[in-house]
Amino acid sequence: MELTRLKAFATAAVTGTSALFASSAQAVEIEYWQYFFDARVTAMEQLIENFEAANPDITVKMTHFPYADYRTKVAAAIPAGEGPDVVQLFYGWLNDYKAAELIQPLPTDAFPADQIDAEFFPMVAAMREGDAYWALPTAVRSLALFYNERLFDAAGIDGPPDTLDELVELGKMMTKRDGAGNLTQAGFTIGMTAQDHHWWREGLVRQFGGDPYLDDYKTVNYNSEAGAKALEFYVGLGNPEDGIAGFGFMDEPQAAFKAGRAAMHIDGSFRIGSLNKTRGLKWGVTELPATADGLKSNYSSYWVNAITTKAKDEKYDAAVKFMQYVTSDEAMQIWLDVVGELPAKPSVGLTDANASNEVFGPFIRGLENANTTKFVNESAQRQIMVDMVARINLEGASVAEALAEAAAAEQKLLDDFYAAN
């Protein structure tokens, strides 16, 4: 009897141990990488907690780096078989990540392209190639006009401008210069190093009747009458004699606005968090100014998540599940509440509560007339815009000359890229 009991105990112990090892074998850990930004880290911690509760066999380890180091870390880790299984990247980096074989396309059974086209805002189609998507965002961004309520009140102005003409008119009422003509308070901020290069391309060029690019952003098209009018309007805002802004004023446009030295500032929804933390700043936000006949145009950008080439077998399957969750309606609402970035789906963004929100609403409504520039090298293409304005302001080039040089430089950049890819 005792021998029988011992055999039974041993059998049970072996069975229990086998079950334990089987359970451990089924458990999988994946890594998620993003750049460090307080609100983004907080939001992702909440998403990971929710995901792990619903998927107890999957653990997600998050790693983040300073923005300046982020791309280098990713580029070094994945080819070595290390680092993230799911990675965050700026949409404009997609071609670089594909060319370096850092990411793989999303599986079409879990992410049907036609379904994504129907459920997401149109600008995410930049992530599609053929019948597959390579990456998807949890949130998207658009531009809006921030305004300093204290400066508006001091000037006796009831509210923000609705049109470009009103932007100039109201800006003049709040622009101040000292006896030597130096700008001491700007009616508006200006600078291609911030968000203005996006506003100029996708906003002003279109509002003045043009298309900034053709052939799915492979052909530069802003060297046109519309482009010239848009550039003339833009640089005129910074005219040192009668403009409402100053190129280089307080170094950065957002710095001038946060310091209370500029009345109006165009920026993205990601700026909301830092403005909320700026003591003494009382601000509002409205949609980008339209033309006199009501034409609106906006720019949208976004960070996406993608599955890396490191993810294989059970880690790949877990990464697919995680991607499905971070692109769900629930995840998008959490991201909006915590980070302030806009849901990537109309089903979340265009709810009455979100679209009418006094802070988020102008950005969300702006998505309806937004376009997304397909960059091959976002930083290089931005620098071309910076140089274009500098030629006018510092070298005395005409608008036509500066525009032609910029268009030629950017076209070469595009041609070289597509010839090599």
Image (tube, rainbow, N blue to C red):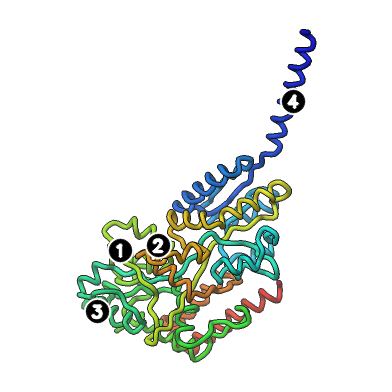
Q: Is residue 62 above or below residue 158?
A: above
Which residue position holds label 1?
Answer: 259
Question: How far apart are the alpha carbons under marks 3 and 1?
Answer: 19 Å
Q: Is residue 398 above or below residue 260?
A: below
Q: Secondary structure at mark 2?
A: helix
Q: Residue reaching furthest front?
A: 1
Label 1 crowd (10 A; few <14 / some 14-19 / many >=20): few
The image's mark for residue 15 is 4
Which residue position holds label 2?
Answer: 353
Q: Secondary structure at mark 3?
A: helix
Q: Earlier in the sequence, mark 2 or mark 4?
A: 4
Label 2 crowd (10 A; few <14 / some 14-19 / many >=20): few
Q: Amino acid at mark 1?
A: Ala
Question: How far apart are the alpha carbons under marks 3 and 4?
Answer: 82 Å
> Which tag is nearer the camera, tag 2 or tag 1?
2
Q: Amino acid at mark 3?
A: Met
Q: Residue reaching furthest top?
A: 2
Label 3 crowd (10 A; few <14 / some 14-19 / many >=20): some
Give how far across and how far down residue 14 sits, in percent. 75, 23
